[in-house]
């Protein structure tokens, strides 16, 4: 169906309406410049890197950019040699995650040694709370299940202690 002319002589498709518009109509205009600079595949690889390659490799590597099918990965020198041997498997994992053959080669860039992630400081639990955990599992026979339940109780107490100061702030 062709657009009819309006009273002012303008074509209906050329007219700008100042009324409410759907947000979805604005999204392409807003995201086009961002995607021109960085492809969606690159953003997905950067965001999901640990899930793609696993925590051990993600701890010592960082994806930098994906251009023309070549993924640049920053890592320490000795790790680069090991990753070259694993390059076919890495490319397979990445392409499977993306659902297309977006990565055709890997390029390794040497950086300084990456620091391991910081471990949280140990939390001291009250002896009364620990006694309560032991009392809760005291009626069970001595087994792996009893030990696992006691460990779960200690973990829950630790988590509660870590989050309690945040929950009690006014």
Image (tube, grey):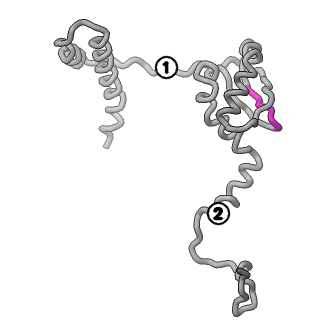
* Residue nearer the viewer, 102 or 151: 102
**Front residue (pair 126, 87):** 87
Q: Can residue 88 be seen in this view?
A: yes
Return the disc, 1 or 2, that comes first in the chain's sequence.
Answer: 2
* Mark 1 touches mark 2? (CB < 8 Å): no
Q: Where is residue 42 in the image (x, y as percent from the top left)?
A: 71, 39
Q: Is residue 16 above or below residue 156?
A: below
Circle 2 packing at 10 Å, graded few (<14), some (14-19), many (20+), is few
Q: In the image, is residue 106 above or below residue 67?
A: above
Find residue 119 and name its label: 1
Q: Given the current orientation, which residue lies at the most extreme right position?
A: 68
Mark 1 vs mark 2, foreground winner is 2
Q: In this view, does 94 lie to the left or right of 138?
A: right
Label 2's element? loop
**Which class describes the residues within 10 Å of circle 1: few (<14), some (14-19), or many (20+)?**
few
Q: Give the range drawn in magenta.
A: 68-73
Residue closer to the observer: 28 or 163: 28
Residue 152: image x %, image y %?
32, 20
Left or right of 140 on screen, residue 13: right
Query: Looking at the rendered structure, which numbered label has been put on residue 161?
Result: none
Determine the CA span between mark 1 and mark 2. Answer: 43 Å
Q: Is residue 128 visible?
A: no
Q: Which residue lies most toward the bottom here?
A: 7
The residue carrying mark 2 is 26
Q: Quadrant of residue 27?
A: bottom right
- x, y percentage for residue 149? 29, 17
Q: Quadrant of residue 135?
A: top left
The N terminus lies in which quarter of the figure?
bottom right
Please report the residue visible at 76 percent of the width from the left and 31 percent of the height from the top: 71
User: In the rendered image, which quarter is residue 120 located in?
Assistant: top left
> How far across and down, in percent of the image, does residue 158 sit?
33, 23
| Picture residue at 80% right of the left edge, 37% below the top | 67
């Amino acid at each position: 169906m062709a657009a009819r002319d309006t009273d002012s002589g303008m074509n209906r498709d050329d007219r700008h309406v100042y009324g409410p518009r759907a947000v979805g109509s604005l999204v392409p205009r807003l995201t086009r410049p961002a995607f021109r600079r960085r492809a969606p595949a690159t953003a997905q690889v950067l965001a999901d890197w640990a899930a793609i390659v696993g925590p051990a490799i993600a701890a010592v590597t960082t994806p930098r950019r994906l251009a023309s099918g070549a993924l640049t990965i920053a890592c320490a020198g000795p790790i680069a040699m090991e990753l070259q041997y694993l390059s076919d498997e890495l490319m397979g994992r990445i392409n499977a995650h993306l659902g297309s053959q977006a990565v055709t080669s890997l390029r390794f860039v040497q950086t300084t040694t990456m620091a391991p992630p910081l471990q949280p400081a140990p939390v001291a639990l009250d002896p009364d709370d620990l006694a309560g955990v032991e009392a809760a599992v005291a009626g069970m026979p001595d087994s792996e299940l009893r030990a696992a339940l006691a460990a779960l109780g200690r973990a829950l107490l630790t988590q509660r202690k870590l989050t309690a100061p945040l929950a009690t702030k006014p």
